[in-house]
Image (tube, rainbow, N blue to C red):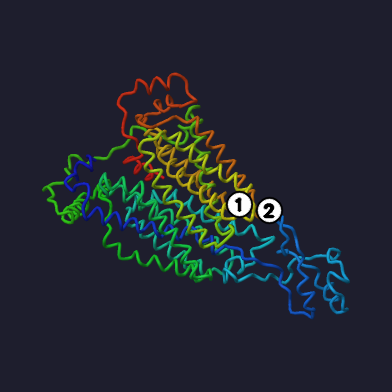
Amino acid sequence: MGDYDEDTAFLGQTGPYFWTTFFLLNTVFVSTGFNGLYIIFAGAAPKHHCLIPDVNLTEEWRNAIIPFTIEDGEEVQSQCSRYRLDVVRNLSAEGYIPGGDVNLTSLQQEGCLDGWTYSKEIYQSTIVTEWDLVCDNQWKVPFASSTLFVGYLFGSLISGQLSDRFGRKKVIFMSLGAQCLSVLLQSFSHSWRMFCIMFLFIGASQISIYISAFVLGTEVLSKTMRVLFTTLGAFLFYCIGYMTLPWIAYGIREWRTLLAVLSATSVVYIPLWWFISESPRWLITQGRVAEAEVIVRDAARKNKVEAPPVIFKESEIQERSPSRKYTMLDILKSKNIRCITLMCLLLWMAINIGYFGLSLNTSNLSGNPFMNCFLSALSEVPGYIVSTLLLRKCPRRALLSTFLTIGGGVLLLIQFIPDSLHYVALALEMTGKFGFTMAFSTVYIYTAEIYPTVLRNVGMGMCSSAARIGSITAPYVIYLGTYNKVLPYILMGSLTIASSVVNVFLPETLNKDLPETVEQMQECQGLCCGSKERKYFQNGATRNTPISHEGKSEVQTLT
């Protein structure tokens, strides 16, 4: 195919058509924001203790039947055990007084045989209260969270193929419909298993929406608008949805109703079908040149410019196919590429564990869980803005190491903050989220600039898979907090600091030519390389504009 940007240059860089497409596509990302993390509220565990059945007990014994345990230095009621009911009932009938006539520590304990009583101070119902996902069944909550990210993994593998086959626009709206239906069916789940199964479909449809909308935006928008769309637009509108979620959950404290309302919000996207066009680039690759011209002429009419008589010349329309297709095996063949890939995989995994771990942990923080979630989402906004500005001028390696050190360092400090200063701990956690957000946006660009063109798609795909594995692991990292509340912070902080050290050995890419071939990448080994790599960059030809601007569209299209 000829150069599409040159063929459509008459449309200009801005105009009503581009701005309308920009905002409409970005509104789609709002749905991924508040549909992606509602498990924070739907899966929250309220305060609870063993249910005491309606038997003949004195008020003293009814208050004393729940033993006290020490957790994090505080004496609290046990959530998973009680004194044996038959023994307590006999002692109550015989007139003994707990703590006076009877030493409670000498009494035998039993599990919550009759179920649990849950506090309704914050939540009316969650999946935890619905199916008693506490004590021995507590692991089922992080497992449910992980199924969403497993769905992300499957969706990221198939969405690209579906959009290449059926078109970007169709896949976006099919995925929106699938997400709407899946969330609605999940709200009617009759068991924890059904909830998890529906979460798989929700994850697959959600990542498919994100990827397909991102691809469509990068292909339809002009160069100038593409930069804004890929660097800030999609991320900020995702944050808008993320920040909206806690306020919806604040007004709806019952998990089934919450999911039904979130599902219904997808209906507002139906009219967008008539306002968002298919990608002319994709249509041309399918040989549907006439349809592509109709869309471009309509864009010219809306931008109030005149289109040439012939936009796409048949002689210029031809398929480009590389002489050779590269696979994952090509990455394994070279020691240098294997080394770089392993370091990139560790980076992506560590960043995703930290990012999603902190996102999912907001309901466990001291204070109001709704406000904590809002602040966690709000902390991402300056993160995306600051990282976008810094990437224009600053070295990627130094930036990423700094962001990782900020994110991991503050997490390691949290364990030293006393419980009485929970606002300080919250501020540190938000700072950590700020660091992970900046690292999240930086690693996309940095990785794509490291890999050569012939391996960029394969390399980014492997890193994206590592990211999904990290996000699948994140709920279990947070689950460690049930044993000791500082364990998740120690693990995430240590892993992040370790990845920041690994990052030092990757090559710098600022103002360097993007490698085109495997041979060029093998010479670009940063601190791991010898003089060959340094000589290559010193003698390199022209230094191109860094990919962090327009090139980011290519990066995130691939992920």
Residue on which disc 2 sits: 483
Q: Quadrant of residue 96?
A: bottom right
Element type at mark 2: loop
Position in image of residue 69 (x %, y %) = 75, 60
- Residue found 70% across the figure and 64% down from its top: 79
Q: Residues within 10 Å of mark 2 (few under 14, many from 20)?
A: few
Determine the secondary structure under disc 1: helix
Q: Mark 2, mark 1: which one is toward the viewer?
A: 2
User: Which corner quadrant holds the N terminus?
Assistant: top left
Q: Is residue 557 left or right of residue 529?
A: left
- For label 1, count other residues whose C-alpha is less than 10 Å away and answer few (under 14), some (14-19) or many (20+): some
Q: Which mark is residue 309?
A: none
According to the image, label 1 marks what residue? 476
How many numbered marks are there? Answer: 2
**Left or right: residue 413 compared with residue 444:** right
Question: Mark 1 is on which residue type?
Answer: Tyr
Q: Residue 240: give x, y in percent of width and height.
A: 40, 58
Q: Nearer the viewer, residue 71 or 130?
A: 71
Identify residue type, mark 2: Tyr
Q: Position of residue 80 (x, y in %)?
A: 72, 63
250 or 229: nearer the viewer: 250
Q: Earlier in the sequence, mark 2 or mark 1?
A: 1
Give 500 or 193, whichever is nearer the viewer.
500
Taking 554 as reference, is 75 above or below it? below
Q: CA distance from mark 2 to mark 1?
A: 12 Å
Say which residue appears at 31% left-offset and 41% top-offset.
550
x, y percent for residue 465: 49, 44
